[in-house]
Amino acid sequence: MIAFLTTLLDGLAYGMVLFIISVGLTLTMGLMRVVNLAHGAFAMIGGYVAAVSIEGGLPWALAALLGSAAAGASGGVAEVFLYRPLYNKGELAQMLLTFGLVFVVTGLLTLVFGVEFKRIPLPDSLSGEVSLGFRTYPLYRLFVIGVGALLAFALWLTIDRSLYGARLRAAVDNPAMARGIGMDVDKLFTVTFVFGCALAGLGGVIGSELLLVEPTYALKHLVTFLVVVVVGGHASFKGSFVAALVLGTVETFGKFYVPSLAAYLSFVLVLVLLLWRPHGVLPARSLS
Amino acid sequence: MAALFVMSRAQLALARSRLGAALPWLLALGFYLLFDDQLALGTNVLVMILLTLSLDLCLGRAGIITLGQSAFFGLGAYVAGIVALRVTEEPLFGLCAATLASAVFGALTGALILHTEGVALLMLTLAISALLEELANHASEWTGGADGLQGMSVAPVFGVFRFDLFKHTAFLYALAVLFLWFVVLQSLIASPLGRSIDGIRQSPARMRAIGTPVWWRRLCVYTLSAAMAGSAGALSAQTTRFVGLTTLSVLVSGTAVVMLVLGGIRRRYAAFVGATVYVVVQDYAAQINPFHWMLVVGILLMVTVLFLEGGLASLPEALGRWFSAALARSRRRRAPASGRSPT
């Protein structure tokens, strides 16, 4: 029972990391409908910037914010110069361009930092263990679960309940009409893209304990991030939240109880879920 | 009398297109004769061309967006390797077995996933190839696991041509297989099936409306494409006598897509240009630094997508268009100046 609960918590923590990173992808790929294979590259940029800032003596929290900001900024630059010309060019061109971007970022990071992984050491205030009654448990994983839950709530408020969210949904549903009534759609898209990439960067820093920061990060975890978004359903935040938690928990349980089958488990799950519901488990209703 | 020497315009065009069609094959033979020490690289290029052609059929012609071509390539390679180790060393048998196995696997998985579209389809192809990779990793008794399949030997082709250390036989063997597939592909594209595939890519709904069995046609093309990729994998296994887990990795699928787009989608010889440029650039950049090639290839890919939609194979046309446009512009600029005669 104790082992079961511990595994459940581990699974939730892993699922939350997946959620924090992938929810940015739900914004850029799900809502804005760009096939974005480069999402992991922005998470990786966040991780590297944070690691370098900590080596430079900055405190962990500041470094995490800096990493997130750097990822957001590079995302903004990429959106204006690379993604925008491709919004009307179809899935294949987008897939290729973003794949090229992954290669370029990987190549550049290797050139500067080498092939070894970068550590992002935890601050003392987060690195201890706490007692949960039935056993002690790493504080950091509880912190991750908390941040993930908080983020999910904040995002739901922003997208579902704020004026910005309403504008964004309108602009995605019908850009021409949104322009017609005077909305600056280009700016809205850029802001959203920056936001999505900043979330990726934050996830890259926070999740660095589970997904090590190294140059091949973007390629290695590409499938995992995509799976969360696609399984969750395009443009569905609730869907990606559920998908991230389910995938994270299932994979963690698989590794613990049936280690020989764990690697298959998540892929089989994806196959079954997507064949059962090609548009995602919880597809968004609002899109036309 | 003069008619013997002066060809008509149509004859000239025909002769030129025939020469154009033969040129890549002549170049390949020329490479064989001139670059005796580079035949291993050349063989690799030929294998990659075949893989790229298979993707052009599936992704370019039929519009099936896939990142799972590595599944068929890797399956073909492993089947050829296992056949050589356990059944017979006869290369043609191994090649046929690998092609057939990939075709069957393509037909089965295609039947399962081809009713989906877009990103869901992309993910399904990814998941299938990842599943196969895990399977190969675990079934180490058959596949050698992470160490790969080693120690296979391949009998002479037709019992005569030995696979030598300098890859003379390997190069010509790969070239012959590539040529056969190329002929099959060209006749398919010209056939009614090929025309209907073009239609399906442009508008599945309309093709369905005029009574085309869309799902069935896509399955046919997917299966054939899988068979081609399987042949490419078998060639890779037989000519290098090694099969590693990397043949099944996403990187192979990604590489194939990159080579296809570098060359240009749906152009007859574009796969030849794309694969050659990719392999040579990769080989050259990797000699300097193993991670350089990612940077170089990434930039090449992004520039192609942003500025050269038809790929490198369309570069002469694009330059020609640009040149004639520039010529016309300068003529227009000059024309009023010369027309303004002194009064």
Image (spheres, rainbow, N blue to C red):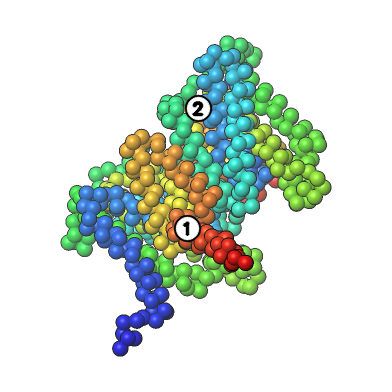
Q: In the rendered structure, which amino acid carries the disc numbered 2?
A: Val
Residue in the picture at 34% in, 81% down: B6
Q: Is residue B47 visible?
A: yes
- Chain bearing tag 2 is A
Q: Is residue A116 left or right of residue A285?
A: left
Which sits in the foreground, B162 or B35?
A: B35
> Residue B231 at what x, y percent from top left?
36, 57
Residue that numbered label 2 is attached to: A213
Q: Residue furthest bottom?
A: B1
Q: Nearer the viewer, residue A259 or B77?
A: B77
Q: Which mark is residue A250?
A: none
Decide: marks 2, 1 in contact (CB < 8 A)? Answer: no
Q: Residues within 10 Å of mark 1 (few under 14, many from 20)?
A: few
Based on the displayed image, in which of its 4 quarters is residue B10 positioned? bottom left
The residue shown at (25%, 51%) is B39
Residue type indicated by callout 1? Leu
Q: Nearer the viewer, residue A111 or B123?
A: A111
Question: The numbered mark 1 sits on a residue in which chain?
Answer: B
Residue closest to the far front: B343
- Are the residues flagged by discs 2 and 1 from a single subunit? no
A252 w.r.t. A30: above or below: above
Instruction: Give the residue at mark 1.
Output: B319
Examine the rendered structure and indicate whether residue B11 appears above or below residue B140. below
User: From mark 2 to mark 1, how far is it between C-alphas?
Assistant: 43 Å
**Image coordinates for residue B324, horizontal then vertical, percent:** 50, 62
Q: In x, y percent, where is residue A166? A: 79, 40
Task: Judge whether A131 appears above or below B180 on screen.
Answer: above
Residue B295 picture quarter: top left
Residue A183, position as x, y percentages in the image: 78, 43
Look at the image and tell me whether residue A17 can be seen: no
Secondary structure at numbered mark 2: loop
